[in-house]
Image (cartoon, rainbow, N blue to C red):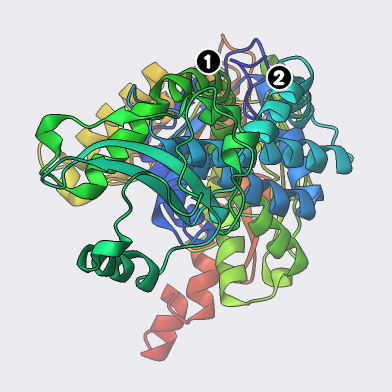
Amino acid sequence: MEDNLSLLCPPGKRAHERELPEATYHDLSVETICEPLSKMEPERALLRRMMARISGDPDVIRYRCDVFEDILRFPKLREQMQKLLDRVDFLKTYGSFDKGSDAAGVWELVHRLDEMDEYIHCVEAIYAVLNENAISSEGLLNLKEYVRNLYEDCGFSELKKDIENLKVDAAKVKSVTLGVNLNDRFEPVETGIVSINEKPFTKSNVIANFCEFLNRKDDVQPDTEWNGNMTFRTSGMDLEGATETMGRVGLMRANPLFAAAGMARVDDDSRGGDVIRTLDRAISALLTRTVKKLKSVLSRHVSVSTHTISALIPEFLFYIRWAEYIEKMEAAGFHFCKPQILEPEKREMRAKNLCNMKLAQSFFEKGEPAQEIVPNDLDFDAEHRIYILTGANRGGKTTITQAVGLAFLFAQSGLYVPAESFAFSPADNIFTHYPADENQTMDLGRLGEESSRFRDLFQAATSRSLLLLNESFSTTSFEEGYFIARDVTRILRRLGVRTIYNTHMHKLAIELDELNEEEGGDSKIASLIVEADEGKRSYRVKVAPPGGKSYAHDIAEKYGVTYEQLAKEKSLV
């Protein structure tokens, strides 16, 4: 399980993710939707990258949906896990677990022991958090089992005891008493550890006293006896009595790591150098053998554990940021649901009161009431596999087209969908075909660019894809555009791919019966219209024959620009 531990994919499976096409990423406004999730650009970039990879595997999607449900249901779990994973990531990134060198020093050892102790507490806390909440998703249960195995099956408890015995509280170490042997030129030739202390020396009792001793001949001791309190600690020496005077930690006596401490000879080339560097080398020389051995033991265990757990941080972050945001939107009155997954081969979708996530987010960010958004019901099945969507300008055709694409994207990312209910057969990818900018059509012309782009899209699509066409082939004359659009609709029916074709070509929708009677394919085309009442936009869609005039007559009549109204204005009737 260790190598496959993930919150995005079940153990033993591959996600088989596909990159969302760049056009789809842009047309579904993925970047805009991820913008409010975090104030930190690195986090937003991570969220965008994860949203841009889509898996069509039902088991993977179900696995993700269950994990997200757990994280959404337990806010306390989100908060605690984020803090704990941040601590693990800090240890991995800035700690010394994977930065060992052969020339390990005493201070590196001290910090390493502190880091290891912190890591042990993190693992125990993660297990406690997962145990305290009634999680039910396979992903979080796998994580809980992995953490439990860390100290039950991998000798974690023994390691914990070892660390407790070896650990030095770095915060208590304020000073080190060294014994230094000098030559005739006052250059250090040998040094040894006298004690490690809890209190720091002060200027008066270090530098000032030393200078005073040099100026007072009677205070320079004739030997190494200094009031009975100047004994080097060497290997095998009795270390009792090392805790007097300065409140010493007593490491020599209690910690076997320092059993190798003795006299270290200073290299001739180092005697005239920096004193601190010289002493540091001397201390390291005393402890290198012991420290290297411990480093090897710790690194073997921790490098695996920290990498495995810290690798989950981006996945947790993805779920947590979306859970936080959706929770806020739900509190503001917006409705979300856990998607229900249907068999991929059915190529179906059943959406009830579906909203466009981008529109809902815009309302939420502006503080506008959720009730002002008009939701829609829409199904994909064998009788309604391809929709020719027609209606008035600015009536909501593009909004509902985008809403379906975002619903698939959210559901296949494992997230809740802005709807009362949403059941769907996963798509292997989502393709969009929106009008191109003029500066992208200089070489081929607009119609040529649209045709070339659709050909590439069609070659990549399968019967299990989702296609969203927005005013495709409408940048030329009606006759030319209709000719291409009709052939495109015919071949999409043969392929059986779920499609919404948003267009003003009402003639295409009028001829659906003729197109549906052609041989080949198991799917039918249906007419979907945006309802209007006396020129007023309702933003609701329904399956019905097209209005025939894009509701232009109703709008023209409302504003007094029909032929009859204008003629009457000029008394030309």
Indicate the position of residue 254 as horizontal and vertical percent values: 65, 35
Residue 108: quadrant of the picture: top left
Viewer-proximal residue, 240 or 431? 240
Quadrant of residue 238 within the rendered picture: top right
Q: Which residue corresponds to the image point at 54% horizontal and 18% vertical from the top-left?
A: 297
26 versus 144 height, above or below: below
Q: Residues within 10 Å of mark 2 (few under 14, many from 20)?
A: some
Residue at position x 50%, y 40% in the image: 110
At x 79% / y 19%, what residue is drawn?
152
Q: 196 or 320: nearer the eye?
A: 196
For numbered disc 1, what is the local secondary structure? helix
Q: Amino acid at mark 1?
A: Arg
Above or below, 551 relative to 378: below
SS class, disc 2: helix
Residue 146 visible within the image: no
Q: Amino acid at mark 2?
A: Asp
Q: CA distance from mark 1 to mark 2?
A: 28 Å
Whether residue 391 sits left or right of residue 49 in the image: it is right
Residue wearing tag 2: 59
For residue 494, the mark is: 1
Q: Check the image and report above or below for 200 versus 131.
A: below
